[in-house]
Image (cartoon, rainbow, N blue to C red):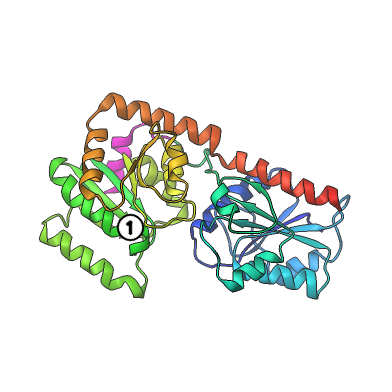
Amino acid sequence: MAELFVTNLNPRFTGVSATAANVLRQQARFHDLHLVGHPLPGCPAPISVARARALSRTPPPDRPFSIWHVRRNPEMRAAIWARDVLRLPIRIVFTSAAQRRHSAYPRWLISRMDAVIATTHSAAGFVPHVRAVVPHGVDTELFTPARDRAADWAALGYGGTMGLATVGRIRPEKGTDRFVAAMLRLLPRLPGTVALVIGRATREHAGFQQQLQEQIAAARLTDRILFPGEVPADRLPSLMRALSLVVQLPRYEGYGMVPLEGMASGLPFIGSDAGYYRAFSVDGRTGVIVDQDSPDQVADVTFGLLTDGARYAGMSAAAREVACTRFSAATEAEGIEAVYRQLWQAG
């Protein structure tokens, strides 16, 4: 008879998984809840969908129904089945981050939600039943600034004296090629700097990654632009603490947590005008938004930031402050809680 069920039916740890985990760790402090599906780092052990249905048959004490919070198509489908076919006393809340029109099937699923939480005002324009706009937040207790960044970087074993990275699936949409093009221009100007491409390419994009690695080899930078693959979720905070900068240049991004994870770790960021990056940058205080498809500008901006100690220190401090005060997981959890209360009070 838990009052809240948070679903995670994707076995892979994705950006959606990360945002769900950030909030769930906060919610577990003040809700009787269950994670449903696959494990999430730092969260309660999950239960099956069948078990969640069984536990939802009776409303929790002092509540007219339980809430199922979903974030993906299969999760919406499972919740709709529980509510409309099995007639369980539940209401369904969906978080939507996409800043573009959904295809027909997701639109139908979303139309069946009891409440929708949009992560941005732009995303709110593409979905019905929006009860609140609540930006995703970062776990500022998990992602923290380094005490000795040089030592943390050396401990990772990638070589060099300083590291920067882009994080995400290796594919054109994520701008991996933009990052590589900028690094080919930047690294000869910054001896000792190593660039990491953190993520994996699916079979569809294996050729894309190979082309990038061939460009790197032709520039004789194979030992300075590395492809370590995916980093497990529990190792990502230590990686972020060791970096000096994150560079995210996607062509499309629904929201984008990587700049926030860097900011909470005391890192400024360089980003394309995608997702919610411009809001994160706070008019240039915490990050720099660059033109689309301009590797020379990215290289110049990055070089200028990393070689200006006073400016870098100021942006680093501002990045941490903004992450904690405007974009924390605790703040997101509070916004979501207001929507839950609206549903429960309406009965």
Against 28, is 326 above or below?
A: above
Residue 61 location (% of width, % of height): 88, 52
Please rate how many residues cluster around mark 1, counting C-alpha atoms within 10 Å: few if below 14, some from 14 to 19, many from 20. Answer: many
The residue drawn where x is 72% and y is 48% is: 339
Horizontal side of 340 relative to 275 (left or right) equals right
Residue on which disc 1 sits: 175
Viewer-proximal residue among 104 and 196: 104
Which region shows up in magenta? 145-158
Secondary element at image label 1: loop
Residue at position x 21%, y 67% from top? Answer: 211
Compared across the picture, whether 215 is left or right of 51 comes to: left
Q: Quadrant of residue 114?
A: bottom right
Q: Amino acid at mark 1?
A: Gly
Taking depth in this image into account, of 112 and 176 the one nearest to the observer is 112
Residue located at (27% from left, 55% from top): 178
Q: Left of 168 or right of it: where is 39? A: right
Quadrant containing the N terminus is bottom right
Q: Looking at the image, which residue is at 56% across and 53% down?
A: 123
Q: What is the quadrant of residue 242 in the picture?
A: top left
